[in-house]
Amino acid sequence: MEKITKKSLNREAAGLTQKLPIKVIQYGEGNFLRAFVDYVIDKLNKKADFNAGVAVIQPLAGGLVDVLNKQDGLYNLFMKGIKKGKEIQEQETISCIQKGINPYEDYQAYLNLAKEEQLEFLISNTTEAGIAYNENDTLEGHPHNSFPAKVTALLYKRFQHFNGAKDKGLSIIPCELINYNADALKDIILKYAELWKLEDKFVSWIKDHNDFHNTLVDRIVPGYPKDDIDSYQEKLELEDKLIVSAEVFLLWVIEGGEKLKSRIPFDKIDENILIVEDLQPYRTRKVRILNGAHTTMVPFSILYGNETVKETVDHEFTGKYIREAVFEEINPTLELSEEELRTFAEEVFDRFRNPFIKHQLSSIALNSISKFKVRVLPSILTFQKKYNRLPLRLTYAFACLIRFYKGEWKGESLPVNDDEKTTSELKQAWELNSYNEIAERVLKNGNFWDMDLTEVPQFKEKIATALELIDNKGIEEGFKAFSEKSE
């Protein structure tokens, strides 16, 4: 059967010819921003009359801007997942992007964006390495090496063009996955102002009339579905070379106040977007619940015999174990309200059950010791301090972690994936003569935990007991016996 050739996606063919004023400059044209920020802006345009066009800046010399411009900024977003127990599949044609600019080919077009009258926002996702200082960057860069240098040059041009007008400052909302991302970006911009000897009035304009908002973003974006692209294209009337897939869940926490709320009507769309005074409790919530549950389940569930996250949470024993670890041992250690924590945790388990994402446990076993220290150990220590006893499931999971690093289980090798020093020290511990000695050796290792965990009451004894039960009875029966001994 002859394959039918479709017309390419563009505004005329799609009937989406409306022009929008440039209100947003976006650094980054990759999958995440298009499935996250541009999706939100598009929804604001459609549901809340936001009337915001986006100009996308290609942050690196190689990128997708040419393809994006050929499609007039249009692309299709497919969202799949579980929401409140129901399977969801949605598709949206995103139309907020008005143009893409490659500053490596047309630097003047990039600088001209500074003159946009209705420009209000600057948003970015240039990866964790993007917010960096390069002392070799100059004001006249064509373009600059670092992303913050590009931003500084654009802001300076805007300052000059509008003579430092107070109302021409921007709301700057970086989405890079580092803590205090906006504060870090602001500090580097001010360093460039000093390096380039820019006038004090510009520095004051940056500090007083531009708002920098720290953020936390969360959405799994597999991106372009190359392995299944034909089935996606079959759903579309026009050929789209920039299809992006994402999970249904979305979380955007932004530090800000009434000014930001008045600028962006997030309250008029049904999305999980929070404007808060301090996002640190929400960051801790994500690290302890979402990431903590992942890290808790990996050794425990692999040793049990599961292969994926979904398999783990769907199983009668392992699923119940992880739920109780989260709801009874992690949530009670956090500062947010019980309702907020419960709602977030339920959303996390919906994400874990997503049938469209096959998340292998072995793929998230990388650096499990350092992950456990950051994501799970604080919950154990806080729980012990608050209730004067160790959390049953998290403690047992810690023992499973130690057992996992022995490297073999029932005659099969385990997918341990860590640096040589860590794996070597764990294997040496397993050469000792008793479970007490193994527990003491591991818990005392300051390189792992930045503290001596044998000083935590009953921790060494509990871990030694759990290790022995795991080896002698297996994961499920071992846990039952461990629970009885802990009563």
Image (tube, grey):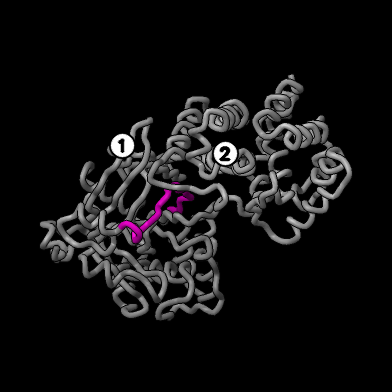
Instruction: Using the image, tell me which numbered label, if any, was put on residue 270.
Output: 1
Decide if residue 126 is on the left or right side of residue 266. right
Q: Nearer the viewer, residue 155 or 185?
A: 185
Instruction: Give the residues drawn in magenta, as a range.
Output: 211-228
Can you say whether 178 is above or below 379 in the image? below
User: Looking at the rendering, in which quadrant would you find the C terminus?
Assistant: top right
Residue, disc 2: 293
Farthest residue toward the top? 487
Q: Residues within 10 Å of mark 1 (few under 14, many from 20)?
A: few
Mark 2 or mark 1, which has the lower sequence index?
Answer: 1
Q: Nearer the viewer, residue 47 or 133?
A: 47
Q: Residue at x 31, y 79 (%)?
A: 106
Which type of secondary structure does the marked residue at label 1 adopt? loop
Q: Residue at x 33, y 44 (%)?
A: 80
Decide if residue 294 is on the left or right side of residue 249. right
Rendering coords of residue 463 (x, y %):
77, 35
Q: What amino acid type is highlighted by mark number 1?
A: Asp
Rendering coords of residue 436 (x, y %):
86, 38
Can you say whether 350 is above or below 105 in the image? above
Decide if residue 483 is on the left or right side of residue 27. right
Decide if residue 2 is on the left or right side of residue 229. left
